[in-house]
Amino acid sequence: MSSFPDARAFPAGFRFGAATSAYQIEGAVAAGGRGPSWWDRFAHTPGRISDGGTGDIACDHFTRWREDLGWMQRLGLQAYRFSVAWPRIQPDGRGAPLAAGLDFYERLVDGLLERGIEPHATLYHWDLPQALADAGGWQARDTAAAFADYAGHVVQRLADRVAHWATLNEPRCCAWVGHLEGRHAPGLTDRRATLAAAHHLLLAHGLAVQALRAARPGAPLGIVLDVKPYTAADDRPETAAAVRRADGVFNRWFLDPLFRGRYPDDIAADHAADMPEVRTADLALIAQPLDFLGLNYYTRGHVRHDASLPHPHAALVPVPGAHLSTMGWEDWPQGLELMLCRIHREYAPRALVVAENGAAEPDVVDADGRVRDPARTRYLAGHLAACARALAAGVPLQAYLVWSLMDNFEWGRGYTQRFGLLHVDFETLERRAKDSAWAYRDFIAAHAAAHAAPRGA
Ligand code: IFM
C-alpha cells in the first residue's frame, strides 16, 4: 500500500475502475445471431496469432457476466469500461438491430448500475463486421456512415444509463497496426490503406457524434486515443527530428484533427503522396466539441534516428535498468503525467479519463492459490501517483481505469499476455484476484474513506 499515492489527492467523485473489450473477453461468437467480425477471420487465419488463440471462447464473459460483476463489486470498482460488439447488434454491419445483442448490453449496464458501478461504453473496439470488411472495411468511406447508424441503435437503447460514451477505441492502432504493420486485422502493410482507414475512422467518429447529439442531446460523448510520449536517446538533431515525426504519427495525427480541425502540416507533407480524399466538410465534422477525451497510456518510445527504417525513421533504444513488462514495454509513469499535462495545455479537452493503463506480467498461481504480482502493483501505484500530480497541476481528470479487469485475448499475442487484475485459467475459466487487485481495492477504499461524510454530519 505504501507506494500508492495519498488517496486524498483524488477529489470526491473521482472514479477508479477497470476496462475490457468485447472480442477480448466475451467468447460466444455465434450466440444470439452475432455475425462474424474481421477479428474472427484474422484470428482463424493460420500464423496470425502467436499462440494460435482465437476469441471463440476467450473468458466466456458473455455467459459469466454476472460472476464478473460480482468480482468488480468485491474489488470496490466504481466504473467499468466495456465495448459493444458491432456484429452482435448488426451481424452484417447494417440494418435492423438484433434484440438479443442490445438485451445483453442492457442487462450488463443495469447490473452495473444495481451494484453502484458507473458504465463507460465504447462503441468500436476493433471488431468490424466481416460483411463491411468485405466491402472495403475502413478504407471505404461508406463504413463511416454505417458506424453512425449502428451507434445510433445502441445509444438510443442505453443513453439514459451510460456515464461515458466513447465512439472509438484507439483509431491509431486500428489504422496503423492493422493496415501498415499487419499485426492486427485486416493484416495489411500498405500506407495508403492506413491513411484512408485513419481518416474514415475519424469521419466515423464525427458522423456518430453528429447523429448521437441529434438523437440524444446531453449523452456524454468522447473518444479514446492511445498516446505515447517520445524521448530522444541521443542529442543529434536527426534524432530530435525523428522524435517529432514519431510524435506526429502517434499523437498529433489524431489529436490535431479532433481538437484543431486539421491534420498536422509536417506529417501531412511527409505523406502527401498517400493521403486519401479529405472533403471540405470532413474536418469540421471530426472536430466537433466533445465532453471528454479518454487516454490509453502504457509506455514511452525512447528512440534514435535510423534512416534505414521507414517513416518516422525512429529506432527504439532500450533504457538500461528499466523494468519491462512481458510486452517489452517500459514502466515509465512520468510519461502519463507528461501526456495528461501536455494534452490539457495544448488541446484543452473539457475532461480527461485514463481509459486504459496497466501491465502484462508473467503471473503464476502459487501453490497456496495466490498470484503474487508485485511488478503490476508497483506499476499501478506509480501511474496513480502520476495522475495525482496531473490533478495537482490542474488537469481535469475524472477517472482512472486499469487495463484490464481480467486476463484476456491480447490480439496478435493471443493468450500469452496477462494484463488482468483477475487471473483467468484459460482451461477452466476460473477467475481469481491477483495481489495487485487487492492492493487496488484497498487504495479505492482509502479514497472512499477519505471522502466519507463525517459521522453525524
Ligand atoms: O489489449 C489492448 C487493448 O485492446 C487496447 N489497448 C492496449 C491493450 C494492451 O495492448
Image (spheres, rainbow, N blue to C red):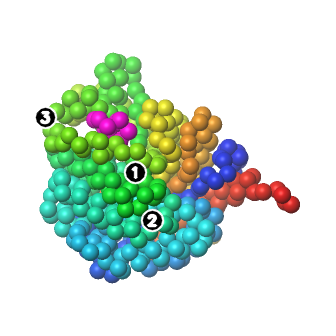
Residue lying at 44% horizontally and 69% vertically, measured from the top left: 158
* Disc 1 versus disc 2: nearer the observer: 2
Where on the picture, by quarter, is residue 397? top right
Q: Which mark is residue 159?
A: 2
Gap in Å between the C-alphas at discs 1 and 2?
Answer: 16 Å
- Report helix, strand or loop for mark 1: strand
- Report helix, strand or loop for mark 3: helix
Q: Which residue is mark 3?
A: 273
Residue 205 position, x and y percent, is: 32, 52
* Disc 1 versus disc 3: nearer the observer: 1
Residue lying at 60% horizontally and 40% vertically, measured from the top left: 391
Q: Is residue 456 above or below residue 238?
A: below
Residue 238 position, x and y percent, is: 30, 21
Q: Which residue is mark 1?
A: 223
Sequence-earlier tag: 2 or 3: 2
Q: Which residues are magenta?
A: 252-263
Amino acid found under the numbered disc labelled 1: Ile
Can residue 290 be seen here? yes
Gap in Å between the C-alphas at discs 2 and 3?
Answer: 41 Å
- Report helix, strand or loop for mark 2: helix
Residue 149 position, x and y percent, is: 28, 64
